[in-house]
Amino acid sequence: MKICVYGAGAIGGHIAGRLARGGAEVSLVARGAHLAAIQANGLTVQAHDGTHHSRPKASADPRELGPQDAVIVTVKAPALPDVAAGIAPLLGPETAVAFVMNGIPWWYFLGVNGPHRDRRLPAVDPGGALESAVGLPRTIGGVVYSAAEVVSPGVVHSEHGNIRVILGEPDGRISDRARAISAALEAGGMPSPVTPDIRQEVWAKLLGNLGNGPLCVLARRGVRDTFADPLLREAGRRSAEEGRAIAAALGVVLTDQHVARVAASNMAHKPSILQDLELGRPMEIDALFDAPLQLARLTGTPAPQLELLVALVKQVARAAKLYPDIP
């Protein structure tokens, strides 16, 4: 299977390494020193089951890679406009595009029944660029669990073995194309279930982002160190509960266990949004934090703690020149 990973940073690099290990014909869209290292020396993934080395074709220009059987988009949300502008050369007539990302996806309301059917989300798809460039018929939803970071150019380190990529069609079908991408990932050692309810999985992952992300940014520490303070661990639980209430208002049912997992988290790993702050990279505030709060307001769901924490995170990001100033 010919698969391009668009955005081969930590998560994308790990996924690409797994695909290569499983025998897929892998290419990468990357940039900077990471791209140069992969072109010169290949891609190395340090994982719980060993160190995996591969030599995928890599370029900053999708035109050099050509049409694919599938594209897996793993960029951070602020880079999505660049994806919309550059993805066309990768798309053949039947190419599927799996958006394996954090936060509320751009396609969330498209084609679903209910009071918000076909509502657009400008915060995560400004100007409808992704909808125009990719379109819902090509789109597969995705959620990834992989505590990974680029430890040096061309080298990705994954902290633990609880890794998986969950895929699902926005309309709830269990499709052959989603199964094909899943099989390619699992052949490389990355579990990849296909679900009939990808929106539930989006929210299940998002509870963790809401529960620990803002607090870790404000504390400037990883999850374990932040949650070592019982008051902050309880604050993380309350944030997850507010996220659960927003999901419920949209018809997505999450359990007490979903919230409990957030409060029980003991990873030393720093959330990616904190890594971005420390490295001076654009932060995923809109997709991870602001979009859920917009949905809270849309549904009339109170989320006072999240409103406060996200406002504080925005101020931290503004001080670092990583988020627009208040007009």
Image (cartoon, rainbow, N blue to C red):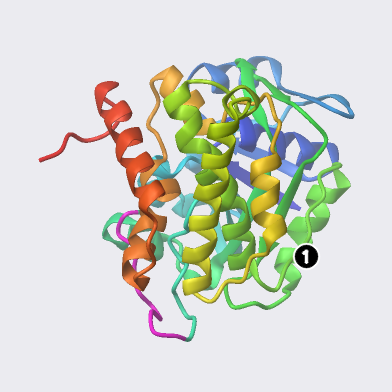
Predominant secondary structure, magenta span = loop
**Residue 151 appears in the rendering:** yes
Q: Give the range drawn in magenta.
A: 114-123
Q: How crowded is mark 1: few (under 14 residues within 10 Å), some or many (20 or more)?
A: some
Q: Is residue 115 magenta?
A: yes
Q: Which amino acid does label 1 sit on?
A: Arg
Seen in the picture, residue 322 relative to 300 is either above or below; the reply is above
Tell me what residue is drawn at x 72 percent, y 57 percent. Answer: 257
Residue placed most toward the observer, 291 or 315: 315
Seen in the picture, residue 220 relative to 73 is either above or below; the reply is above
SS at mark 1? helix
Residue 157 image position (x, y, % from top left): 71, 23
Whether residue 19 sits left or right of residue 33 in the image: it is right
Tell me what residue is drawn at x 58 percent, y 59 percent. Answer: 202
Q: What residue is disc 1 on?
A: 179
Residue farthest along the left direction in this orientation: 327
Residue 290 image position (x, y, % from top left): 36, 50
Seen in the picture, residue 179 relative to 18 is either above or below; the reply is below
